[in-house]
Structures are given as C-alpha cells and as structure tokens.
Image (cartoon, helix red, strand yellow):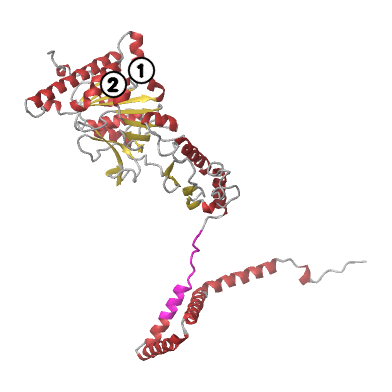
Amino acid sequence: MARRPLPRILSSTSVPIARSREIARTAADSATDVLHPLITISRGLRQIAAALRGKWAATPKERRGPALFLVAAVVLVVALIPYGPLLALITVMAAAAWKGRERTPVRTGPDEAETGRLQALYEALVPYFSVAEDPSPLFAHGGEWAKAFSEYEFDDAGRVTRLLIRYPAYFTDGEPEARARIEQLLHTKSGRGREYRFEWDEEGNQLVMRVLDALSTSIAAQRFVAGPGETVLGFTDADAVQRTVPVTEGEDVRDAPPVVWRTGPRSTEPHLLAVGEPGSGTTTLLRSIALQALQHGDVLVVEGSGTGEYACLTGRRGVLAVECGLAGALATLEWAAHETERRLIAANRARQGGHPTPDDIKRPLWILLDRPSVFGHLADADGRPDPQRLLQTPLRHGRAAGVTVVVAEQFDSLEALTEPVRTHTRARVVLGPCTPTLAEWVLGVPPHTTPTTAVPPGRGYARLGTGPVLRLQVPATPDPYDDATSEQHRQAVLDLLPERDLPVEAAPPQQAVPAEG
C-alpha cells in the first residue's frame, strides 16, 4: 500500500518556529528596556506604600486622628502653592525611582567553598584544642566552626587572609613548642607560599592569623632622609615602625617605613652581622651601607669571596681601601686596629685636658667585611693569624672611637666566626630563605612570621639589639659593573658613588698609623 505524504505544515522543519521564538524574545527584551523606568518606579511605589502601611499599622489608635489631620494640612498647603502638585508629583516619582532601583546583593557570609575551608581548619585544630575531660569542648569532631572562628576574611581565590580563633583556656599557649605546632598547622592548611603573622592574646585566649602583603622590591638605592649616625637597612611593614621616609619608587614618590640602624657613641648596637645563603642579598646590603656611610665617614672594605663585588668603590673619595687578598686584608685590619687605638687615646687626652674632641677623630670609620671566614681558611693553610683576630679592638672599643664594623657571612660558615664577632655584633640581619630555627639561632628570638621557601634577593628579617624582629627588604643596590644589572639600577648606584680622588692602585693611608709611644 502506497504511503500518503503528510500535510505540508506538518512535514516542514522547525526553523520558522525557532525564528518566531527568537523574535518574541527580542521583542520582550526590547519592551523590558523601554519600560524599565516605569518598572523601577512601580516597584518603588509598592515599597513606599508597604512602608506607609507598616507605619500606619504601628501608629497607636489615639494618634491616628492627629496624623490624618497633619497629612490633610500638608496636602492642602501643597495644593495651594504655585506648582505645588507638580513638584509633589516629581518628588514622589524621584523617591519611588530611588527606592525601586536594583541593588547589588550584600554578601553576608562565606560561600560554600569558603565554608568548606573553615570547616577543614576547624577539624584540623580539634586534636590540639580539645581534651577528653572537657564536658563542653569548643573544638570537637563534627562541631560548629562558627563558635571558634568569630572573624574571617578571604581573598579573590577563596583562601583565608585573616582569621580570629578562640581556643580553650587550658591550651598551653605559653609554651613555644605548642604555639609553633599550631602556627605550622595553620600555615599548611591555609596555603603555602604566603607569609603569615600570628598574634597570640594569652589573656583573652585568642589567636589572630593574617596574611602579610609582600614588601616592595622596586625601591632602588638613593639618598634617604636620615641624620648622621643613621643608616637605612631597608624597609618593613607600615605598622612595625613609627617613622616613614620619602622614597622614589619608579616614577612615583611615596612614604615608606624604614628599618633605621643607629650607630655612634650613644648606640646600643654599634656593630652588625648579616647572614644569608649565596644570592640572598648580603653583599647588596653591604654596598647599600657603604654608599650611605660615605656621606659622613670613611670606609674600609675587605672582601673574602674575591669576586670583585666592590670594585666600584675602589679609589673613590672616602674609600680608604678595598682588599680581596689575605695579605691586604691583614695589613688593612691591622691599620684599623691601630687607628681605633689612636682615636681612643686622642679622645681620652682631650677629655682629660677639658678640650673638645679633635676633628681628625670625629669622622666615622666603617669596616665592612664580606665573608671573613674565607681568610681564616687561607690563613691556616699559610701559617698566618686569622684576620678576624684583628677585629677585637674595633669591636670592643669601636663605639667610643667612632668605628663601626659590619660583617656578612653565609650560614654554612657561621661556626668560623670568632667569639668577639658573634658577641659584639648585636644588630643582626638574616636574608634569604631559612628555617625558623636557623633564624632564631641568628636573631636570638624566632621571627613573628612564617618564612617562605622562595623570596627575592634582599628579603629577610632584622633585629636591632633586644628590639623586635622586623621584616626587611633591602633596597636594590647591585654591582654597577655587572652586565646583568639593569640600566636604571646601574645609574642609581653610579649617581651615589663619590668622585675618584685616588688611583686604583692606591694603598691604605699609612700616614694615619699612630706613632709608637
């Protein structure tokens, strides 16, 4: 039997139907755009009417009569004044449009992913903040994290940036080991690669964890606003110090919080020790200190690595010597020891005679040693004394004589430093990646933040005497003769270098050695 064809309307494709739907949707969207002001005003009028009904319902019955009379009087006054009804209509429409505008919904709590992170942190802290004898534990498996985490903030990636934790009073927050376990756990669970600060409130049984912003690495060497005897080691967090200095960062000028090291007769930490791994920025720190010291004093440089990192200082005004060999280091440090003694004798004679301090001992003398442990090994092999032994006099009496010693060494050679160097360098700097234990061994106390495994050169911590541990970023002060140095940083260092007034082969000023007797 032959099959009869279907009617044309039933056998046609669905293209016209889809096209009709698209036309209808476009027309609806256009109508919505055109009528959007009317829709907004209508929504505002409904909200105003609802608010008036609620206000009328909340008004006591004995006050409704006077309220109606007051409303009638206002309507009469508006109707009698010129253009009153028109102005009233415009005012009502404007109020309705403002009331009915579309508002962005305000976020009132964490989303699902953030809630999961908080619950995971809560569960991870249960073994440390709970005991079996607690009848009403604040931390329990399956418990509510909202009771323990009263404040929290997240970044755009959904990671915790600030968290306020309440913990039980029986937790041993006075033990450094217990606190370190909590900090390590929170650091691991909240995301690695960031630097966290932990603030313990033992009285209130609260712990605040917050993520610190990275310190700026774009501040180059420049003239800092500092007085005589003040050296800017680098820059830190804004809430860590009470002082700022104007700095040029790229093309902008802003105020930055500095880490200022004070030297001189009234300094409590007249000498400094900087420690770090290769490439951590200790040599950059010594170059920055040398450029600042040359403004008001003389500089001696002894480089143990022998890589020529301080060749730009050779022959400059105020640079007495730049030594890279063992013989030159011994001769230079021996002269520095005699110069310290001469200054002490001259100052003592002036005080005994009631005279002011002589001008030839007022100018500060800076002794910069980069990796002195290398000379110790060479001296042992050659049968000569360790050059560090010649630092005993400048270290012990340098504050009174106006002599400052700065030593830079690597972690693996700290044991080679002599006892006077470790004892009298009360200002300490740790640069580069290091463990909290190693940082505590150098600084005397553990840092208040969690060190990260990857940091830019010049990033670390500083502690001046018995003060707090401060985060530090050394200003970029590279070797201007290095081919890898950018032109901007090279020119910044060259602009700070004094003019040359001695030939490159000049020796230390032997005429300054005091005469016998």
Q: Residue at x 34, y 31 (%)?
A: 429
- List x then y, in percent, for residue 17: 69, 69
* Residue matched to label 1: 374
Name the quarter where the N terminus is drawn: bottom right
Choose between 494 and 469: the one closer to the eye.
469
Circle 1 SS class: helix
Residue projecting furthest to the right: 1
Q: Left or right: 84 with respect to 153?
A: left
Q: Which mark is residue 302?
A: 2
Q: Nearer the viewer, residue 290 or 62?
A: 62
Q: Secondary structure at mark 2?
A: strand
Residue 224, can we see it? yes
Do the numbered discs 1 and 2 sit on residues whose CB atoms are within 8 Å? Answer: no
Residue drawn 28% across the image and 21% down it: 302
Percent position (x, y) of residue 433?
43, 32
The C terminus is located in which quarter? top left
In the rendered image, the vertical position of residue 54 relative to residue 266, given as above or below:
below
Query: Image height check: is 213 above or below 489?
Result: below
Residue 69 at x, y percent in the picture: 41, 90
**What is the magenta range?**
91-108
Task: Please report whichever mark, 1 or 2, sits nearer to the chain's N-terminal start.
Answer: 2
Q: Position of residue 314 (x, y in %)?
A: 25, 23
Cα–Cα gap, marks 1 and 2 = 11 Å
Label 2 packing within 10 angstroms: few (<14), some (14-19), many (20+): many
Looking at numbered disc 1 in the image, what kind of residue is underneath it?
Val
Any magenta on residue 264? no
Give whichever of 185, 234 is nearer the camera: 185
- What's under tag 2, amino acid-wise? Val
Circle number at residue 324: none
